[in-house]
Amino acid sequence: MGKYLSDITLILLGAGNSTRFKNAVKKQWLYIDEEPLWLYVTKKFQKNFSFKKIIIVSSKEEIKYMKHFASFDYVQGGETRQASLSNALTKVSSKYVLVSDIARCCIPKKMIQRILDAKEKASCIVPSLTINDTVYFKNQPINREEVKIIQTPQLSKTKLLKKALNTHKLFTDDSSAIASLNKKIHFVRGSKKAHKLTRIKDLKELSCLKAPSSKTLTGFGIDTHPFEENKEMFLCGVPLKVPYGFKAHSDGDVAIHAIIDALLGAVGLGDIGELYPDNNAMYKNIDSTLLLKDTVSRITSFGYCISHIDLTIVAQKPKISPYKDKMRQKLALILGINTHLINIKATTSEKLGFIGREEGITAHAIANLNYMNWKNL
């Protein structure tokens, strides 16, 4: 770590929905080797500068998962950048606060040092770029020498920034808020390398980012349910023509439940009971394919791709083989992979135990996942 900065707190903003990125994966969850982008950026700051505190702002669901990766101060974001920053500032007691965007992921150390070195020169220190081309505003040319492209991180006096943001007026950055108080803004030289990741095409401008690891992540899942008479049975989302179903809070689709747990296990997202608790009325008799779709959406947004599923159904009854093709097709549609990458095996328990007594079914699933290769976007 670099020199200890006892009077500066670092805030990293990453609570946005990545709508302009236009991909199922949120940009903060693109993997750089084996680290998500938000962690890569944070560690880069941490390696070069030792701040009093590092605060990461994100959505509630993402924070829960982020805590599995590293121990930082996490704060839930708001509806806007300004709301997110205001939430984070409640946790700041240092004289200065350095605010940056996780999406600005290739900031040179020297640029940050220029900002820190100028902290006594104004109420807000801002990196900026000049414009070399002719600039028009409302069809009229303006003096390009008076135009600047503003970047982050920006260093502000904490008390002033808190005061400036205590308004209904929205500001696009910290310097605009500080300027509204008629306080001095000081500009330092920014860097073209500090390009912000906003759209997919921006990835080509970010040479500091390594491709994701090709590692395969594997998870295992298991589920068991007893039979219940006069209830429709579903396995892998396919209805079976038998006069009994599963005793369960949901539709009891043991195959899908096992697959969900395998997927969650591969990425460390807990288990099906944590995400879809059986004491929650909203999941009463729910179609398990909806739970699987939601699980797939979650793990995709967190930067993972499903590559293969291996499912074993242990049942004395009913016969599974007549339904295997439909099951593969149904799962393939939900998982977004080809049918040949889904293997379904059926076996009995040789009439042993509760399965042998025809009282219920157990399903075992193995899921293999990879990091989404954003280099191919």
Image: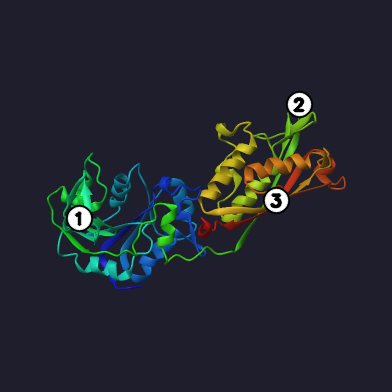
Q: Position of residue 106 (x, y in %)?
A: 37, 64
Question: Which secondary structure, mark 3?
Answer: strand
User: As shown in the figure, which amino acid type bears the numbered disc 1?
Assistant: Val
Residue at 62%, 61% (x, y): give it.
Answer: 216
Q: Is residue 228 visible?
A: no
Q: Is residue 15 left or right of residue 245?
A: left
Q: Which label is found at residue 230?
A: 2
User: In which quadrant of the rendered view does residue 233 lie?
Assistant: top right
Q: Nearer the viewer, residue 326 or 148?
A: 148
Q: Is residue 252 visible?
A: yes
Tag 2 or tag 3, which sits nearer the N-term?
Answer: 2
User: As shown in the figure, which amino acid type bears the numbered disc 3?
Assistant: Ala
Q: CA distance from mark 1 to mark 3?
A: 59 Å
Q: Residue furthest bottom?
A: 2
Q: Which residue is mark 1?
A: 147
Q: Nearer the viewer, residue 111 or 240?
A: 111
Q: Which label is found at residue 338?
A: none
Question: Which secondary structure, mark 1?
Answer: loop
Q: Position of residue 8 (x, y in %)?
A: 26, 63
Q: Which residue is mark 3?
A: 365
Q: CA distance from mark 1 to mark 2?
A: 74 Å
Question: Which secondary structure, mark 2?
Answer: loop
User: In which quadrant of the rendered view does residue 192 lie?
Assistant: bottom left
Residue at 55%, 64% (x, y): give it.
Answer: 213
User: As shown in the figure, which amino acid type bears the numbered disc 2?
Assistant: Asn
Q: Is residue 372 left or right of residue 78?
A: right
**Of tags 3 and 2, which is closer to the observer?**
3
